[in-house]
Image (tube, helix red, strand yellow):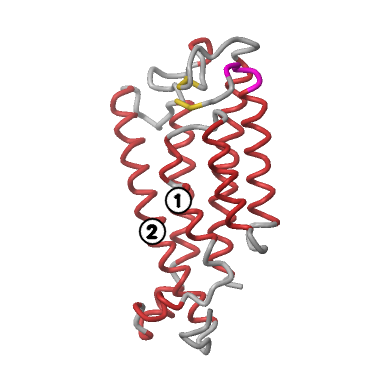
Amino acid sequence: MNKATRVIAVTLGTIFGISGISHGLFETLQGNTLTGGLFISAIGEAYKMWPHGNEYAFTLIPNFLITGIVAMIVGLAIIIWSVGFVHKKNGSTIFILLFVLLLLVGGGIAQTIFFPLIWGISTRINKPLTWWRKILPVKIRESLGKVWPWSLIVSSSLIVFVLEIAIFGFVPTVNDPDVVLSIMLACLGAGYGVLLLTLVAGFAHDIAMRPNIALNEK
């Protein structure tokens, strides 16, 4: 097992599972009312904490209360699957299916840009990383591999900060909603970029820990 790769997948799965639960919570607060369409604001007007705090979502369920309950259940399922089962046989397939289900039941739209990447990471947990062994020079594997825990902390922190801003609109010392929105988008881009570094560094670490695997191993 590629341990760093698994830790990255588990961490991200847990974060976005919690995000799905938070969407569901705010949807339930809107009560037993019709959604009025497929695209909704998870946070209703009565609960908005800043002008851009809508938390847009998509749902096939035409009721806020039921949508919220299902979103929370799926979000919790993603957390459980991330921690206990993503590394099992067919674990990555069920992983992405849960993320798709979360999208369809009000778990949020914006974070879907991360779902394909997280799924891709999960598919490599029990693989020999053959392609990466070919393109990552031996001389940099060990040094690059040492970066992954720190870059994971940075990328996860940025993503969590973005999720916090999306709900609460809080950025220390900043009160202008448009500036807050710009900071949120900048942190989103930075978090995604650092996550890509984390991915490569994690692979480098796992390769360095298993240097004798044949390149033609399946």
Give whichever of 23, 179 is nearer the camera: 23
120, above or below 182, in the image: below
The residue shown at (32%, 35%) is: 183
Q: Position of residue 170 (x, y in %)?
A: 43, 28
Q: In the image, residue 36 lies at what x, y percent?
A: 50, 12
Crowd around label 2: few <14 · some 14–19 · many ≥20 (10 Å): some
In front: 138, or 152? 138
Foreground of the two, 15 or 109: 109
Q: Are marks 2 and 1 in contact (CB under 8 Å)?
A: no
Which dot marks residue 196?
A: 2
67 up-or-down from 102: above or below: above
* Chain part drawn in magenta: 62-66
- Which numbered mark, 2 or 1, is in the foreground of this view? 1
Q: Which residue is mark 1?
A: 116
Q: Is residue 144 magenta?
A: no
Q: Is residue 159 left or right of residue 137?
A: right
Q: Position of residue 133 (x, y in %)?
A: 41, 80
**Quadrant into which the N terminus falls:** bottom right
Residue 109: image quadrant is top left
Name the quadrant containing residue 112.
Answer: top left
Q: CA distance from mark 2 to mark 1?
A: 12 Å
Q: Is residue 106 above or below residue 2?
A: above
Q: Residue at x 62, y 31 (%)?
A: 71
Residue 105's label in the rendered image is: none
Query: How many neighbours does mark 1 have within 10 angstroms: few (below 14), some (14-19), or many (20 or more)?
Result: few
Say which amino acid is labelled 1: Pro
Element on which disc 1 rests: helix
Three-letter residue code for mark 2: Leu
Secondary structure at numbered mark 2 = helix
* Mark positioned earlier in the residue sequence (2 or 1): 1
Residue 103 relative to residue 89: left or right = left
